[in-house]
Amino acid sequence: MVRITNRYRQYQDYMYRRRRAIIALFGVVLIQEISKRFPERSVWVHHYIARRDRLGCHNTLFMELRTENPEKYRKCLRMTPEMFQWLADTIRPLVQKQDSHLRRSISVEQRLSITLRHLATGETQESLHFHFRVGQSTISGIIREVCQALHSVLKETYLRFPTSHEEWRNIASECGSRWNFYNCIGAMDGKHVLIEPPINSGSTYYNYKETFSIVLLAIVDAGLRFIYVDVGTNGRVGDKGVWNKCSMKKYLEENSMSIPPPCPLPGTDKNFPFVIVGDEGFALTNQVMIPFSKEHLRGENSKVRRIFNYRLSRVRRCSENAFGLIVNRFQILRSPMRYDPDVARNITLTILCLHNLLRTDTLGRKLYSPPEMLDSEDELTGVIHRGAWREEGGNGLQDLARQGGNRHAASPLQLREDWAEYFNGPGAVPWQERMVSLPQ
């Protein structure tokens, strides 16, 4: 009995040692396979990246320009050093990382510099990687994170939709004083924002111009600020689809925007509603005024209607200039964005927030959009001067397809005629006939 017990114990010891040997063998084989697939790094951080704080673009060139040549600094990052620092301090709680015992984290200022430079120039992530001495995969994450943070902290102040009668009246008052179109609460326009074809998306984002895009629909006020935006509808949705999917259409139909009730225009006792102006691509309604088409500019009322078109075009120029500015100043919009649609949407919203910020700040507005950058008109000679933004090639924003049909309800047709009569009567301005090349 004792002999059997000893043999059994010897057998157990033998099996135990064998299992350990087999496990060890499998472990060696597994380590070898992992080593083949994921070779060990020769260095943890490339030496040129390790010298980032001493030789990177942010701590060398940008710091030199900040103290020696602020104008060049503004051209690099599209803003003054003071505004840059304010933005960095504002997003710091959202993007700052902790230093580790092995290495220092990338500063908030460097992260913001990388992102602004990318938006301002459209510079590739590979190029930014070498200039800023930051890993390319890290660059990609920084751009996404900083754009999300910028949109998060700026949207409530600089991309806020008006929600009260007083706010809408202030917008209409500015439009009346600047462009002589009273009771107008903005100019509406839409664009395709071009993107690279998303993986496995098929034709979802393929638009009528044979490019891939997401749609940006916006309303711009008299100061060229975006007061309403709808971004992200896939480019395949055409014709009436974009407008039908837009929340603005629902707001207007349900009268849920807190727009003030109709009121008289200067020089008349007749009530006119507050309206948005657009081009022929939109449908004519009691809330959206569009110009008369060419076939309506013939006959006895042609003069009245041509003047109406001119007066409306002055406000429409706001949206044209605003879209032209963002493409000129944020050149990432000049070509298809190499991002997924969700990231492209977030980048677009960030650009609109920055645009509104720069248009609101007095100094920023003068530097960001000097007079020669915008379309303007000479009321004495009747000449319209093209803004500098039109002279530079490349545009990643394309016009939308027509959103409305040729048939309109009787009520908005009559309302447009009433506006035309007003602009040729109590609401006339001295230079309007000269601007439409009509005899005095």
Image (spheres, helix red, strand yellow):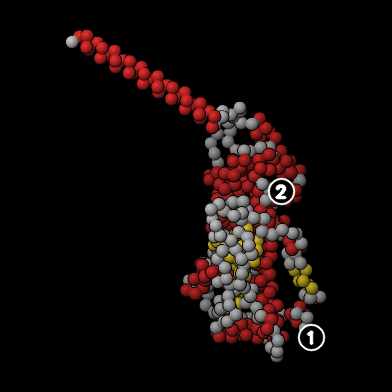
Mark 1: few/some/many CA within 10 Å (<14, 14-19, 20+): few
Pointer 1: what residue? 440
Extreme-top residue of the structure: 3
Q: Along the line of sight, which residue is nearer the eye, 269 or 175?
A: 175
Q: Along the line of sight, which residue is nearer the eye, 419 or 70?
A: 419
Quadrant the N terminus occupies? top left
Q: Earlier in the sequence, mark 1 or mark 2?
A: 2
Question: In the displayed structure, does residue 408 sit left or right of residue 393?
Answer: left
Residue type, mark 1 in image: Gln
Quadrant the C terminus occupies? bottom right
Provide residue 103's location: percent of width, then percent of height: 58, 31
Q: Residue at x 59, y 51 (%)?
A: 339
Pointer 2: what residue? 76
Mark 2: few/some/many CA within 10 Å (<14, 14-19, 20+): some
Residue type, mark 2 in image: Cys
Residue 10: name its quadrant.
top left
Provide residue 21's location: percent of width, then percent of height: 40, 19
Q: Is residue 19 above or below residue 110?
A: above
Q: Along the line of sight, which residue is nearer the eye, 342 or 268?
A: 342
Q: Along the line of sight, which residue is nearer the eye, 98 or 426?
A: 98
| Residue 229 visible in the shown view | no
Marks 1/2 in contact by CB < 8 Å: the verdict is: no
| Residue 417 visible in the shown view | yes
